[in-house]
Amino acid sequence: MSTENEGTAVPADPAAPSAPPTPPSTTTPDQPTAQTSPPPPPPTDAPTVVQTPEATAATQAPAPAPAPAPAAAGGWPPPPPAVPAWGAPPPASPAPGSPRKRSGGLVAAVLAAALVAGGVGGGIGYWAAERGDDGVSSTTVSSGQAPAAFKRDPGTVAAVAAQALPSVVTIQAKSGAAQGGGEGEGGTGTGFVYDQEGHIVTNNHVVASAAEGGTLSVTFPDGKAYDAEVVGRAEGYDVAVLKLTNAPKGLKPLPLGDSDKVAVGDSTIAIGAPFGLSNTVTTGIISAKNRPVASGDGSGGGNSYMSALQTDASINPGNSGGPLLDASGAVIGINSAIQSTGSGFGQSQAGSIGLGFAIPVNQAKNVAQQLIKTGKPVYPVIGATVNMRGEGATIASQGTGGTPAVVPDGPAAKAGLKPGDVITGFGDRQIDSGPTLISEIWTHKPGDSVKITYERDGKTSTATVTLGERTGDS
């Protein structure tokens, strides 16, 4: 195919026949066939030039359809009009004054439409080519505002995170040789500014490795690091309070919310250092409330018990001790434990599967205040030993080390409880196990009076217990 002649007329070859050959006409059945002589073949060395439809349309005017060949005598329908061979010139126009067939007008209209369409298409193609010649056109759309000038509305995740991040710290705990481990062994956790005096609230299991002869370092999001020391730890609550040894001025404590008013479905924002990635923000909702959880630090120490807030915000090892915020930016919990497939509750190296648990801030606040005041935790108690395995919260037959299961003259004894009683309700909470009972007891304060429902010999009874107290973890 030649492209050099596109758009220009091609002169006729003098060797080509001056008139188009007449193709044999088709016949209808039972009609004699008209004999015609075949057209002379074109010279074998004549070049074949194929024009593009645009060139043909530009050099040839539309021609009316050729007149049909005369029908055979007495035959119907008449034979179809002769079809010119591909590439041959169109048949000659009918003589002036000859009647124009209706079909000729239809063909002319179709050709005219084709010419118009071709002209429009060519125009559009030329316009598009002209527009693209400079090579710098673009379909991207620029933002009307630069990110620095974009204003985040209050209550958005970005606004809450920007407000809270300066008060969230990453804690590096390194153990001392006195603990039997290698010098400098430890881990990473999270905490948040509790007051302007430099107190930091976190989990006990975050700092436990450095509590005896180890070192603690607290790093703020701006990169400034400070040494810290343990003010007090509550193993059972899994809460600890640190204090910066040289607290900077201008500390901004995070506001504390009311965890009792949290509702399932409320938005949550977690900030922490998962796997050491400081200042990580994740979001979710409150999935459940009053979830009984027993968790440990993985070192074989005592478990902690909490009536936890459950959230699906992504929480991983390193998030421990970090704040769980509501949509206003107030702390509603301290991220403490996760559920991982095949490993139970606690802080293993497995990742988040959307089951995270936080200590309600109302409980954590009470514990933190007690630790700051005395350095020791205070626990409410009922004065009875409860089985921690099996179904139901059953008062054991014997206490630890052969002591009585029900402390004489203690809260449970005064309420009339005995060994073998199964506690099924504590206040307005249903109790199904020993850990659940402890979790609910520790949401109260010493001196609170609570109604207890219990079963004895198949009979359900109720009693009121005034909670006692125990100081310290030992």
Image: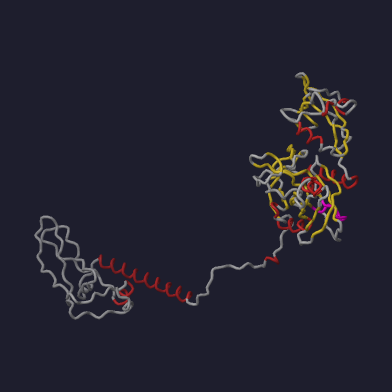
In which quadrant of the rendered view does residue 170 lie? bottom right
Q: Can residue 277 be seen at all in this image of the molecule?
A: yes
Q: Residue 414 in the image: x percent, y percent?
A: 89, 25
Please give the range of residues in magenta.
192-200
The residue sitting at 46% across, 76% down in the picture is 130
- Quadrant (top left/top right/bottom left/bottom right) for the N terminus: bottom left
Q: Is residue 221 left or right of residue 37?
A: right
The residue sitting at 13% across, 73% down in the picture is 40
In which quadrant of the rendered view does residue 469 lie? top right
Closer to the camera in the image, 20 or 215: 215
Q: Residue 158 in the image: x percent, y percent?
A: 71, 57
Q: Is residue 327 left or right of residue 133?
A: right
Q: Is residue 409 left or right of residue 148?
A: right
Query: How many numbered tags mark residues here?
Result: 0
Q: Can residue 333 be seen at all in this image of the molecule?
A: no
Up/down of 222 relative to 464, above or below: below
Q: Is residue 96 magenta?
A: no
Q: Residue 85 in the image: x percent, y percent?
A: 21, 68
Residue sticking out furthest to the top: 457
Q: Residue 200 in the image: x percent, y percent?
A: 82, 52
- Quadrant (top left/top right/bottom left/bottom right) for the C terminus: top right
Closer to the camera in the image, 343 or 300: 300
